[in-house]
Amino acid sequence: MPGAENALGNRSNPSINPGMDLKGQKRRAGARRERHQGGPQDWRPQERRPRDRRRCPLAVALRVFGLVAAAALGAGQLAGCAKTTYNAAGHDAAAKPAEDIDLLIGREVTYRVERVFYTAMPRCAVVLAPTGKAPAAIKRLAGPSIARYLRDRIPRVIGPVARRRLQTSHKVDFSHNGDRSHFARATRCDAYLTWRVVTAEDNYFLVWSERRLGLALALYRARDHKLLWRGAHTGRRSDGSLPLSPFSVPFAAYEATRFKGDNDVLPSMVDDVVRRIIVTLPDLR
């Protein structure tokens, strides 16, 4: 009878047959639970859905930006550790223009001392005006700088100020070789130095600013206008950085703008380029 008590006074379970063994009772109880819970439980692990391999365009752009930024920072570190190298060009390389001897990383000065230089070493040199087009600021700075460093190599140097005064008194035109020879005899100055601006750039890109200056110098013997020595060098300076986040943009822009407006950068660059070139000239003092 359902709900009847057994001999011990306990209420019996009508779903359990006393004559059924323990395993059979467990199977019957499990089947009843499955009916109440909606069928047998599937304990197999669920299959994982295939992952979408398409990448977000923004994530790809950020990754590329990070790689470019890392490369730029690495190049900046290498440029900061760059050394000035002096390359004694051969006969064929002597005619190579200065804009072709500039390096991406590093500073190279290319020069050549001709054999005739040692047969008749000059004791005096006059610094002429630049050949070709030259910005007024560079023309004003480079001439005196060349004369100043040239005095450390040659005993007597006629700088731009003295040259203009003597040019007026002797009425000569230095664009003609005959007048150059006449001036050399009148002033007893046996050599003249010509120079030109190879490149002069001032680039500004809001977060990065750069200046480039390239000069080429040549020393000639006055009586026959033979080349004695020549040198060329291109220097560059820059400031600013590649922003790694939107918060770094104002700082990079500030550094680039400050470099752009710094009036001491150009005189310092002219002085450095001239010094690096003239140091290749043999000392005749």
Image (spheres, rainbow, N blue to C red):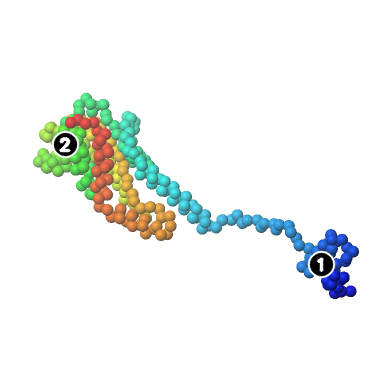
- The answer to whether residue 28 is above or below residue 144 is below
Local packing at callout 2 (Cα closer than 10 Å; few below 14, some 14-19, many 20+) is many
Is residue 10 found left or right of 91 in the rendered image?
Answer: right
Q: Nearer the viewer, mark 1 or mark 2?
A: 1
Residue furthest out toward the front: 8
Which residue is at 71% across, 57% downward?
Answer: 45
**Contact, CB < 8 Å: mark 1 with mark 2?**
no
Which residue bears the numbered disc 2? 157
Q: Give the image location of residue 183, x and y in percent.
A: 14, 35
| Residue type at the position of mark 2 | Val
Does 118 sit above or below residue 138?
A: above
- Residue that badge 1 annotates: 32
Q: Quadrant of residue 196?
A: top left
Q: Which mark is residue 228?
A: none
Q: At 76% from the left edge and 62% from the top edge, which residue is drawn?
A: 41
Task: Residue 77 in the image: state x and y as whole percent.
Answer: 38, 45
2 horizontally vs 69: left or right = right
Q: Amino acid at mark 1?
A: Arg
Residue 284: where, in percent of width, then height? 19, 30
Q: Is residue 273 visible?
A: yes
Dividing the picture into quarters, in which one does residue 79 lie? top left
Which quarter shows the N terminus? Answer: bottom right
196 or 264, which is in the foreground? 264
The residue that appears at 36% across and 55% down in the rendered structure is 252
- Disc 2 element: strand
Residue 134 placed where, x, y %?
25, 46
Residue nearest the viewer, comparing 27 with 252:
27
Along the horizontal axis of the image, is 198 left or right of 3? Answer: left
Could you say whether the residue bearing mark 1 is in a helix, strand or loop?
helix
Label 1 vs 2, first from the N-terminus: 1
